[in-house]
Image (cartoon, grey):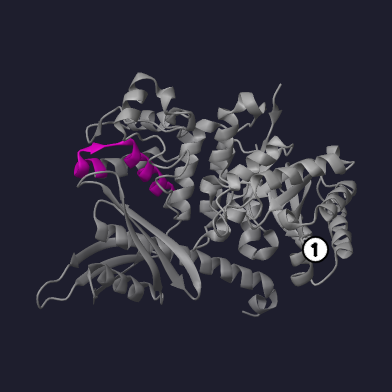
Amino acid sequence: MSDQVFIFDTTLRDGEQALAASLSLKEKIQVALALEELRVDVMEVGFPISSPGDFESVQKIASTIKNSTVCGLARSLEKDIDAAYEALKVSDNYRIHCFLATSDIHVKDKLHTDFNHVVEMATKAVKYARNKAGDVEFSCEDAGRTPIDNLCRIVEAVIAAGATTVNIPDTVGYTLPTEYGNIIKSLYDRVPNIDKARISVHTHNDLGMASALAMTAVMNGARQIECTVNGIGERAGNCSLEEVVMAIKTRSRLLDLHTNVECKQIAKTSQLVSQICNMPVPPNKAIVGSNAFSHSSGIHQDGVLKNKDTYEIVTPEQVGFNTNNMNLTARSGRHIIKHRLEAMGYKEDSYNLDDVYTRFKELADIKGQVFDYDLEALLFFSQLTEEPEQFKIEYLTVLSGGKNVLPTASMKLNIGGNIVTDSCVGNGPVDAVYQCIYRLTGYNITLQKYEIKSKGEGKDALGQVDIIANYKGKNFHGMGLTTDIIQSSAAAMIHACNSIYRAELVEQKKNSMQNPASNENK
């Protein structure tokens, strides 16, 4: 019987660190639920000590997720471990993940100590964490550049202290696959209590070898891979979940390994993470890129028509991609929409059919025919707008401008039930709209990024606008999706404004909790 490789997903921790704007609580829960459907074994969902917002999101996800182990990160400090425990204890199945640097350069230049003290700190932290959790992971940060004698010593020490998983990260993507594989092999050969813990690997893509490093490690005995959806993460990114999972599945006979991941959920999860994180998947990305299953060469096309196995080692159906095989028009009813969403893997309780159908009818009137990719975009946008909205556009008209005419926008905005109106001019139609929004909301926003993407094909394709709005030094992501690019631009900024509003409510709540006396005086 083949060995299981456990999949530890860190999209919501290491992956989020690379984003231009932090995810909202709603967005994090969406990703966590998708990871649960993907059947990852462990999901690392945040660093609770880092901020009140991170603590709240870890706690909420821990109380929501039932079928995966929920993990929180902590430095090897008691206050970090306490914060992780307080956030995670609402779950019946949680892990505390402690880490400490072990390489000479980190020990000397970052920690300003010696290796003896590092071993002492690590064992103390693991023992403290084991008093609060039955499942404790310890990471030897920068293990790839740690002298092997030191690495063996600290791995043995933390296992003796109670670590159930020991992670050997190549933190900066420095090692070569054979070199990394030899590190794992040496640990199994030299650490006497290695059988008392699961060995994990966490690889980065700085030299483009993250997946190769992880696969070489499991071939040498590691049984947990730490990875992210679409490979997002610090710098050049992390090991890609979809790549290692499908490598193990495709070469299972050679490797004699398997994972518990539901592979048909890969495409849907990839698209969700890409949309929410505002990080497009490159067309040539393995497994989930738009070109991954495309064949343009005549020789390739001929081979695939005769036998797909000639040029496809993985089929699109294996990872959940579907072809468009049903015409959806304005005459289609709710049951057809529900049927198509079910065929694409979306459960009925994961979306609001009435809301999706209303948006579908509006789009079908404009486009005529609606395709699967349109439905997925509408479904995502419907989920995105389920959060309470302080700002809603009631009316918008725009004069694009011309010779001797300035671009002008007139807007009616619903702010918490109050209707306000204004008209503004700008450098262009979008700028005029944004000037109206800035003035009506009172937010002094700096537009950091504005990006237009086509969702679909042809003249009736949906226009998706993604923006990064900076407010008081913090970045907020906004997204709009319609067939009209001006309307999409307005919706994106309103989405960002609603995120700003919710963030300010959280900040006010935090301040009131920190200063209860001042509230009583009020």
In the displayed structure, does residue 388 sit left or right of residue 112? Answer: left
Above-or-below relation of 223 to 122: above
| Quarter of the N terminus within the rendering | top right
Q: Where is residue 174 in the image (x, y as percent from the top left)?
A: 64, 55
Q: Does the magenta stretch mainly form a helix, a strand or a loop?
A: helix
Q: Is residue 228 magenta?
A: no
Residue range in magenta is 363-383
In the displayed structure, does residue 268 sit left or right of residue 71? Answer: left
In the displayed structure, does residue 328 sit left or right of residue 279? Answer: left
Please, which residue is most extreme toward the left here? 403
Residue 296, quarter of picture:
top left
Q: Where is residue 185 in the image (x, y as percent from the top left)?
A: 77, 41
Q: Is residue 496 visible?
A: yes
Please, which residue is most extreme toward the top here? 306
Residue positioned 49% across, 76% down in the render: 472
Residue positioned 69% across, 35% down in the render: 219
Q: Nearer the viewer, residue 213 or 509?
A: 213
Q: Is residue 66 visible?
A: no
In the displayed structure, does residue 155 sit left or right of residue 52? Answer: right
Residue positioned 62% across, 69% down in the render: 510
Q: Position of residue 258 (x, y in %)?
A: 64, 29
The amino acid type of the residue labelled 1 equals Leu
Would you name the residue on which mark 1 appears?
A: 77
| Quarter of the C terminus within the rendering | bottom right
Residue 513, quarter of picture:
bottom right
Residue positioned 63% across, 72% down in the render: 512
Above-or-below relation of 107 to 210: below
Q: Where is residue 370 in the image (x, y as percent from the top left)?
A: 27, 37
Label 1: which secondary element: loop
Above-or-below relation of 417 to 222: below
